[in-house]
Amino acid sequence: LPQPPPPPPPVRRKLALLFAMLCVWLYMFLYSCAGSCAAAPGLLLLGSGSRAAHDPPALATAPDGTPPRLPFRAPPATPLASGKEMAEGAASPEEQSPEVPDSPSPISSFFSGSGSKQLPQAIIIGVKKGGTRALLEFLRVHPDVRAVGAEPHFFDRSYDKGLAWYRDLMPRTLDGQITMEKTPSYFVTREAPARISAMSKDTKLIVVVRDPVTRAISDYTQTLSKRPDIPTFESLTFKNRTTGLIDTSWSAIQIGIYAKHLEHWLRHFPIRQMLFVSGERLISDPAGELGRVQDFLGLKRIITDKHFYFNKTKGFPCLKKAEGSSRPHCLGKTKGRTHPEIDREVVRRLREFYRPFNLKFYQMTGHDFGWD
């Protein structure tokens, strides 16, 4: 049988145009799904792409414009909290091998190469054992927040590597998304305020604070889990147990003198650029506290109580569906450790010690956290 004649050239051009329009439509659909799917707690959330933080860093020029050089580990900046060496312990597990969300979805993988890397517009600067990891994991549910999973420790340990190296640690972001990181030791590092201000005076700072007595015990508990042979909490707390003189050189004690550390930050940033999150409310009312954080960051209130459930075993809230996963997600085994029993008299003396500092902190922040 004779073959039908080929379609005229105008028809082929129309078919090619139709195919191109379908491709553009599919791309736009996936692009919009990147934001809208993550907003619904019942849908699969997109991966963070924060694994870029684990890639080997490239050589970068220093802030003063010096040429690239082989990377080396410089000694850490001198923090206010010097502490007793035997009770400091090793780096926290989240610094060594931070928890990484489940594998990203195919859609997230599709977009992993798009966007650009930006310096962070917001940083969680403290405090250690205050609830910073929980806050970051909760915030990463928001489709307009992209954050590094690991703690960069740029402004306290790696500042000599330069801003280009720091930027390369950040995940790629699209227009309208915020880049974030969290390193709790910044709050007690003398050099950090000036360094962050030099990067950008508009950086928004978030500080998660907690009852300093409970925070100190939690700090000690973490060290004890790694070094069971350290002295007791009571012996580390006092320079002289008889006189009741508190040893403020121990970092577990000194970190909780929030007013003292805040004074250094207020020399470089106005108080309106800092948000103080209650570690206690982050447990009792995570959605309410996340609402304040979203407002502070200028984000739409997408994270609500529908995203959380309370885990009675751990004693704190968990996510119904974490970023990059369709399963419930709680923080790892290193979170929610059982605290040792501490002598009540020691706790009472510590509360008396912190009371004037707490009151000053309430005045500076304009918020009573109710620790007294």
Image (spheres, rainbow, N blue to C red):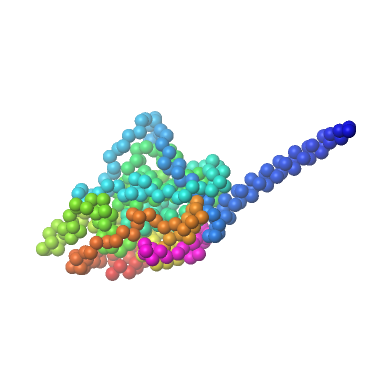
User: Within the magenta stretch, is there residue 170?
Assistant: no
Quarter assignment of residue 221: bottom left
Residue 147: percent from the left, percent from the top? Answer: 45, 49
- In this view, the residue in front, 44 or 114, is 44
Please indicate whether residue 96 sits to the left or right of residue 83 in the image: right
In the image, which residues are magenta?
A: 294-316
Quarter assignment of residue 75: top left
- Quarter that holds the N terminus: top right
In the rendered view, would you say 10 is above or below 263?
above
> Exactly how many numbered labels are in the figure?
0
Furthest-left residue in this view = 242
In the rendered view, would you say 16 is above or below 344?
above
Residue 212: percent from the left, percent from the top? Answer: 28, 62
Residue 195 shows in the view = no
Please indicate whether residue 258 sits to the left or right of residue 229 in the image: right
- In this view, the residue in front, 346 or 59, is 346
Residue plotted at (32% across, 42% down): 157
Residue plotted at (38% across, 35% down): 62
Residue 351: percent from the left, percent from the top? Answer: 23, 66
Residue 168: percent from the left, percent from the top? Answer: 45, 40
Furthest-right residue in this view = 2
User: Within the magenta stretch, is there residue 307?
Assistant: yes
